[in-house]
Amino acid sequence: MNNNPHLKVLGISGSLRKASFNTGLLRAAQEVAPEGMEITMFDIKDLPFYNGDVEAEGDPASVIALKAAVHDADAVLFATPEYNWGTSGALKNAIDWASRDREKGSLMGKPATIIGAGGRAGTARAQMQIHETLAETGAVVMVKPGVQIQAFAPGTFDSEGNLIDEGTKELLRKHLEEFTNWILPLVLPREFIRHACEMDVQLAQR
Ligand SMILES: Cc1cc2nc3c(=O)[nH]c(=O)nc-3n(C[C@H](O)[C@H](O)[C@H](O)COP(=O)(O)O)c2cc1C
């Protein structure tokens, strides 16, 4: 029996590459996600570089779409590559844009977790960097059990970036299971309040 409520998780890959290991990691996450968790992807490739002048003229369509997607999700799952010990410029840029939604609070208080596939350190340093950035946005990040994948180990990914190693899928599955348990106490009170408000409106309309 599935006791979990429907959890909407937004997957954001920091790599723009077609055969990206990190985008592949998110596809695998969709496959092994616990019952009740639905992971949809947001592609950050169309976001312009953050520029206050562009913002002052009004958010471009891709930025509006990003903010709406983050706002509508119960939680965010970031998959980061590691470039020179940091995350990709593309992912940092996406987080910067999403953080500019303070009135609606799209990242403020939003549960999030970070996974990644890269070289020998499995993107640990890139993950730390995003964690620091997310602290300023108000997002609340679950760190453990953690998913740091050595993408170049033979038999881990295929040439199209699909995760093929069963042990790694299991690690991912356990991380998402823990993520579900961790999200619920954060999300359920909001759901409760939303239902209570709807009930109030219905009663008032009688
Ligand atoms: C400019 C550049 C810098 C890189 N620096 C690192 C690094 O510091 N640590 C690491 O683990 N991998 C590094 N790599 C290798 C990436 O982890 C690898 O390209 C990985 O496949 C990128 O993720 P993706 O497959 O999702 O695109 C670097 C790659 C590039 C292009």
Image (cartoon, helix red, strand yellow):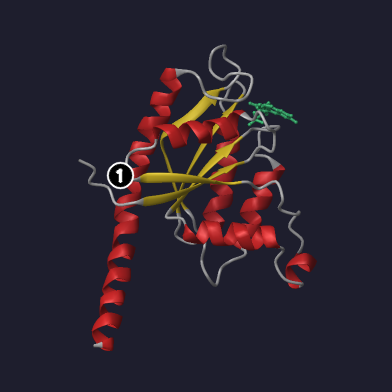
Residue on which disc 1 sits: 181
Identify the secondary structure beneath mark 1.
helix
**Rendering coords of residue 177 (x, y %):** 34, 37
Instruction: Name the image quarter holding the C terminus.
Output: bottom left
Q: Is residue 107 visible from the viewing direction of this image?
A: no
User: Which residue type does callout 1 highlight?
Assistant: Asn
Instruction: Name the image quarter holding the N terminus.
Output: top left
**Rendering coords of residue 55 (x, y %):** 73, 67
- Determine whether 132 is above or below 178 in the image: below
- Determine whether 119 is above or below 203 in the image: above
Q: Which of 184 and 198 is in front in this view?
A: 198
**Rendering coords of residue 63 (x, y %):** 66, 60
- Determine whether 57 is above or below 46 in the image: below
* Residue occupying the far right of the picture: 53
In the drawing, does residue 202 fall left or right of residue 41? left
Give the residue drawn at x 47%, y 31%. 147
- Determine whether 181 is above or below 171 in the image: below
